[in-house]
Amino acid sequence: MATSIPPKQQISRDDLERSFKEMLGQSEDTVKDFLPPIVVGAGVTLGFGAVLIYLMGRRRGRRRASVVEVHRI
């Protein structure tokens, strides 16, 4: 069973808040730097994929569709 060594100083709430703000501030900056290129890349890829699937579906529909002519007598 592991025992913990008591700290020499008490850790205050202010110490914890400062540490959390430092850690979160660094990670938010990193995410903000990479977010726009990822979002743009994903949007372009999804848009291109949607257009490609739409065009392929139209072509397949034209090939499989029958032409029916109705003549009135």
Image (cartoon, rainbow, N blue to C red):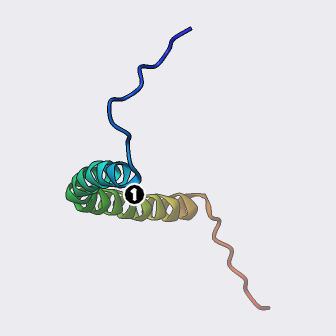
Where residue 3 sits: x, y (%)? 50, 14
Please name the residue that numbered disc 1 is placed on.
49
Query: Image quadrant of residue 37?
Result: bottom left
Identify which residue is drawn at 31% across, 61% down.
39
Identify which residue is drawn at 32% across, 49% down.
15
**Mark 1: amino acid:** Gly
Does 1 sit above or below residue 4?
Answer: above
Q: Nearer the viewer, residue 49 or 44?
A: 44
Query: Image quadrant of residue 64?
Result: bottom right
Identify which residue is drawn at 77% across, 91% down.
72
Where residue 68 sits: x, y (%)? 68, 74
Residue extending furthest top?
1
| Element class at badge 1 | helix
Q: Nearer the viewer, residue 54 or 32?
A: 32
Quarter of the image with the C terminus is bottom right
Whether residue 29 sits left or right of residue 67 in the image: it is: left
Does 69 sit above or below residue 54?
Answer: below
Where residue 38 sits: x, y (%)? 28, 55
Residue extending furthest left?
33
Query: Image quadrant of residue 31?
Result: bottom left
Whether residue 3 sits left or right of residue 46 in the image: it is: right
Whether residue 65 sits left or right of residue 35 in the image: it is: right
Q: Residues within 10 Å of mark 1 (few under 14, many from 20)?
A: few
- How many marks the image carries: the answer is 1
Where residue 20 sits: x, y (%)? 34, 50
Quarter of the image with the N terminus is top right
Whether residue 38 sits left or right of residue 13 in the image: it is: left
Residue extending furthest right?
73
